[in-house]
Image (tube, rainbow, N blue to C red):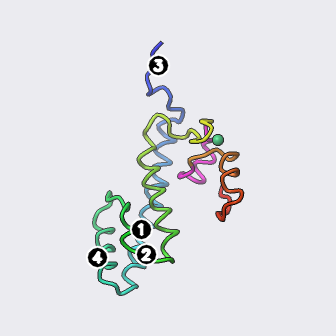
Amino acid sequence: MPVSVQHRHYFTIQQRETLQGLLDQRGAQLREAIAAALRATGNEQAAGLANHLEETDDEPVADLESAIEIAALEREVRELRAIESAQRRLHEPDFGLCEDCAAEIPYARLSANPTATRCIGCQAQRERGSEASPRL
Ligand SMILES: [Zn+2]
């Protein structure tokens, strides 16, 4: 009995649009913050990246981490990458499923943290013993 993958979407279109809005908004904020910080370094390569970030909304920042190492920006760059990844996954059939146990991640959790890729249980397990602090 073939089931269209479409039917595995368990969020409503409206919920997805809300999450998309949250991701877009946060992504724009991060791009601005990163661009400003890159300019503040006075480094020519960094300033070039800053212009690039602001001009191209859809440009992945995949190379940013290796292109420039600024400790202060690591967290922002990592978050921006997580957001871009979530923006890509948002319309895929398995968006919202825990990547460890495949349980459905509650919408409340995703609306608080749209980049979450695991249910709370699996996330807590991951973070136990790592330096990252648990996030909702
Ligand atoms: Zn899980």
> Residue 75's x, y, as percent?
52, 68
Helix, strand or loop at mark 3 = loop
Helix, strand or loop at mark 4 = helix
Ligand 1 placement by image quarter: top right
Instruction: Between label 1 and label 3, give the one nearer the viewer.
Output: 1
Q: Are marks 4 and 2 in contact (CB under 8 Å)?
A: no
Residue matched to label 3: 3
Position of residue 106 relative to residue 2, above or below, is below
Amino acid type at circle 1 is Glu
At 60% from the left edge and 46% from the top edge, which residue is drawn? 118
User: Crowding at label 1, few (<14), some or many (≥20) Cα neighbours within 10 Å?
Assistant: some
User: Crowding at label 2, few (<14), some or many (≥20) Cα neighbours within 10 Å?
Assistant: few
Alpha carbon separation for disc pair 4 and 2: 14 Å
For ligand 1, tell me if the residue under mark 2 lies within 8 Å: no
Alpha carbon separation for disc pair 1 and 4: 14 Å
Helix, strand or loop at mark 1 = helix
Question: Is residue 28 shown in magenta?
Answer: no
Instruction: Between label 3 and label 2, give the one nearer the viewer.
Output: 2
Position of residue 136 relative to residue 94, above or below, is below
Question: Is residue 108 shown in magenta?
Answer: yes
Q: Are marks 2 and 1 in contact (CB under 8 Å)?
A: yes
Label at residue 48: 4
Label at residue 65: 1
The residues colored magenta run 104-116
Residue matched to label 2: 69
> Residue 103's x, y, as percent?
63, 36
Position of residue 32 relative to residue 1, above or below, is below
User: Crowding at label 3, few (<14), some or many (≥20) Cα neighbours within 10 Å?
Assistant: few
Q: Earlier in the sequence, mark 1 or mark 3?
A: 3
**Is 120 left or right of 57, judged from the image as shown?**
right
